[in-house]
Amino acid sequence: MASSSFDQLNLIPPLAQAVRELGYEQPTPVQEQAIPLVLAGRDLMAGAQTGTGKTAAFALPILQRLAPQASASASPARHPVRALVLTPTRELAIQVEQSFKEYGKHLPLRSTVVYGGADMDAQIRELRRGVEVLVATPGRLLDHVQSKTVMLNQVSILTLDEADRMLDMGFLPDIRRIIALLPKERQNLLFSATFPDEIRGLVKSLLRNPAEVQIAARNAVAELVTHVVHPVAREKKRELLSYLVQTRNLQQVLVFCGTRIGANRLAHQLRKDRIHADAIHGDKSQAERLVALEGFKAGKSTVLVATDVASRGLDIEGLPQVINFDIPHSPEDYVHRIGRTGRAGLTGEAISLVAPPDMEALAAIERLIKKKIDRVLVPGFQPDGGTAATLMGREARSAPRRGDAPRAAEPRPMAPRPMAPRPMAPKPPRPQGDPIFSKPYEPSATSAAAAPKPEESSQQSKRRAPQLAALLGGLKRA
Ligand code: AMP
């Protein structure tokens, strides 16, 4: 095997072998920087989003630190939970645990995953066998603590993955309760895509003299992603979406909706337009979510309509397009959403369908990413003059004629694209059915509807930012 810079990371042979078998040739930047720090026992605060290889950046050194205590004994007592990884969603929890299994396959270390919305009993059986690595969503972990089916008093490494999202989702009270159950002497790792200031400061109080690794610039978006805004009247959004998918012959598009009901309705309407579409959100059972995700990955559905929560951590290789059907209410969510595309050196496209009520949210996104996003009018879908003016934030003007030189961030008509062969039959007249599906899509007025419903039992609920200080500030270290 030719030497690779993984060699410089001094991974123990069972891990180096697993990495080779996975075909990884070079560590990614976050791995290069974080692995030595974690191996050295440092607390770590890492700015890296899904797609950067962040999971291996913590899983590999965690496994290496646990390796000396690995035991081939079958006795559960010889396999206490030593590394705890908390994630905001079930999907991410499952993916992270799978990674631990892959990287640790040549070590006698055990791992399992527990998350809400699934049967406790199977999880209890796994926990009873004894596991060194436990990946969990916070609420379900507390359920296990409550029923005394897990002991956390030997945890020596705590990882908070996608910490910003856990904070956003109101998981902090649960996290605080979990941390109180852990030994005070431990290593803490925190991975997060974005660091809104208050969270950055607060989280720091949890970590002990943390090393910092920042992969992309703070709140930066992947450079390989092209951003575009299509101004459109609100009631034409769904039609425009179908038009884009069909005329551009898009093959794999992740579409974001603000609400679960909106996601369901949109997927249903797209299917009526003969587009293979499925939805993934928190109201669906775990099994349904996995089926939808696998179908999308395997190319069975062209469009996967997702809410923010359901999409977190999704690792879909080479996803070419992300479409914001609803503009996210929190600008950080824009960064998260488009983190699904433009990954692993591939180019991606982030398309946002923007109606007048979305203007403020769009401006906040542009401030955050420090980039004015190009507006492109799609002939036939442009809003009327007055509305267009609102969308552009300037006086009414008619859409430029074809041939006008487009200027960046100016409204310009979509360049005629080579028309891909239309795979779909002409649109059938829209059948009258359940009014919930035929009614034009209406984004809810407040972000409350768009706010992710915590995926599981506990009291994360509404307690958000104001409690953060109390929480992390109140985490007294011994
Ligand atoms: P993550 O950011 O951890 O979700 O990882 C994103 C994807 O990158 C996963 O499919 C990993 O298997 C893959 N990956 C992680 N590290 C490497 C690497 N060093 N070389 C190639 N692929 C990697």
Image (cartoon, helix red, strand yellow):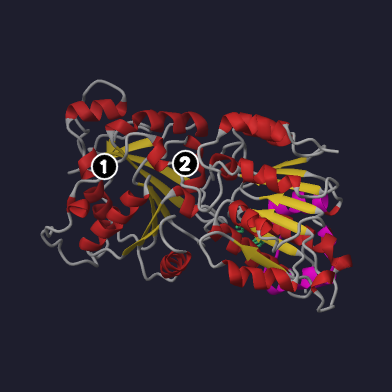
**Residue 457 seen from this side:** yes
- Cβ of mark 2 under 8 A from ligand 1: no
- Residue at (45%, 48%) from the top-left corner? 308
- Residue at (83%, 70%) from the top-left corner? 77
- Residue at (44%, 71%) from the top-left corner? 298
Q: Position of residue 126 (x, y in %)?
A: 67, 72
**Tag nearer the camera, 2 or 1:** 1
Q: Which quadrant would the C terminus be assigned to in this image?
A: top right
**What predominant SS class does the magenta segment belong to?**
helix
Instruction: Mark 1: give few (<14), some (14-19) or many (20+) Cα within 10 Å.
Output: few
Question: Which badge, 2 or 1, comes first in the chain's sequence?
Answer: 2
Q: Over which residues does the magenta segment extend?
A: 9-38
- Residue 65 part of the magenta segment: no
Q: Secondary structure at mark 2?
A: helix
Q: Which quadrant would the N terminus be assigned to in this image?
A: bottom right
Q: Are marks 2 and 1 in contact (CB under 8 Å)?
A: no
How far is mark 2 from mark 1, CA to CA?
20 Å
Vertical placement of 400 versus 337: above or below?
above
Q: Position of residue 456 (x, y in %)?
A: 52, 53
Instruction: Name the residue tied to disc 1.
Output: 442
Tell me which amino acid carries mark 1: Glu
Vertical placement of 145 versus 177: above or below?
below
Tell me which amino acid carries mark 2: Tyr
Instruction: Name the residue tied to disc 2.
Output: 334
Quadrant where ligand 1 appears = bottom right
- Residue 15 part of the magenta segment: yes
Q: Position of residue 91 (x, y in %)?
A: 54, 60
- Residue 31 in the figure: left or right of residue 116: right
- Residue at (73%, 46%) from the top-left corner? 179
Q: Residue furthest right?
A: 68
- Residue 72 in the figure: left or right of residue 295: right
